[in-house]
């Protein structure tokens, strides 16, 4: 009986530790992505299309890098939403539809913030 209790406690501690690690990683990377998107929006507001295109390429590259790790522990449909809005923003920038691109950036930022909030380790998400 004593061995089983120790094993259960060790497993619970590991789960909590892994959750904290993944949450911190998610928050850091999603915040970086949100900051990059805000810079794209800033360039679009100034109607600097070429700069916005360059920054959007960097956003796409960063997303491709972090998506590989997020696939392990986040819901795939949430990740697909972010990717869809990134691609949508990129296509709106390429076709010089500034207002639509700004709207896509805002929507993508909202989805990213929702993911951060959804996977936050809090009582609200536990119960």
Image (tube, rainbow, N blue to C red):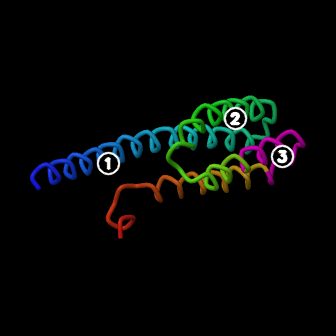
In the image, residue 64 sits, relative to residue 111, either above or below, namely above
In the picture of the structure, the residue carrying the numbered disc 1 is 15
Q: CA distance from mark 1 to mark 3?
A: 42 Å
Q: What is the residue that sits farthest to the bottom in this orientation?
A: 127
Q: Count residues near mark 2 (Cα–Cα under 10 Å), then give few for <14, some for 14-19, many for 20+.
A: some
- Left or right of 127: which side holds 92? right
Q: Quadrant of the C terminus?
A: bottom left
Helix, strand or loop at label 2? It is helix
Q: Quadrant of residue 24?
A: top left
Q: Which secondary structure class fits the magenta region best?
A: helix
Instruction: Of the two numbered discs 2 and 3 on the same chain, state the one appearing first in sequence.
Output: 2
Question: Mark 3 — residue?
Answer: 92
User: Which quadrant of the figure contains the N terminus?
Assistant: bottom left
Could you tell me how far apart the alpha carbons at marks 2 and 3 are, in whole angstroms? 14 Å
Assign a secondary structure to mark 3. helix
Tell me where residue 20 sits by quadrant: top left
Q: What residue is shown with label 2? A: 60
Local crowd at mark 1 within 10 Å, few (<14), some, or many (≥20)?
A: few
Is residue 92 rendered magenta in the image?
A: yes
Residue interval drawn in magenta: 85-100
In percent of width and height, residue 82 lies at: 66, 49
In the image, taking residue 117 as reference, residue 9 lies left or right, namely left
30 and 42: which one is in front?
A: 30
Furthest residue in direction right, as rendered: 95
């Amino acid at each position: 009986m004593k061995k089983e209790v120790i094993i259960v406690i060790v497993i619970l501690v590991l789960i909590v530790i892994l959750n904290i690690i993944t949450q911190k990683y998610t928050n850091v990377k999603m915040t970086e992505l949100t900051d990059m998107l805000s810079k794209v929006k800033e360039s679009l507001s100034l109607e600097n299309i070429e700069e916005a295109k360059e920054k959007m390429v960097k956003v796409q590259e960063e997303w491709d890098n972090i998506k590989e790790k997020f696939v392990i522990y986040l819901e795939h449909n949430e990740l697909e939403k972010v990717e869809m809005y990134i691609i949508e923003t990129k296509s709106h920038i390429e076709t010089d539809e500034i207002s639509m691109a700004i709207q896509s950036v805002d929507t993508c930022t909202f989805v990213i913030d929702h993911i951060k909030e959804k996977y936050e380790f809090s009582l609200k998400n536990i119960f």
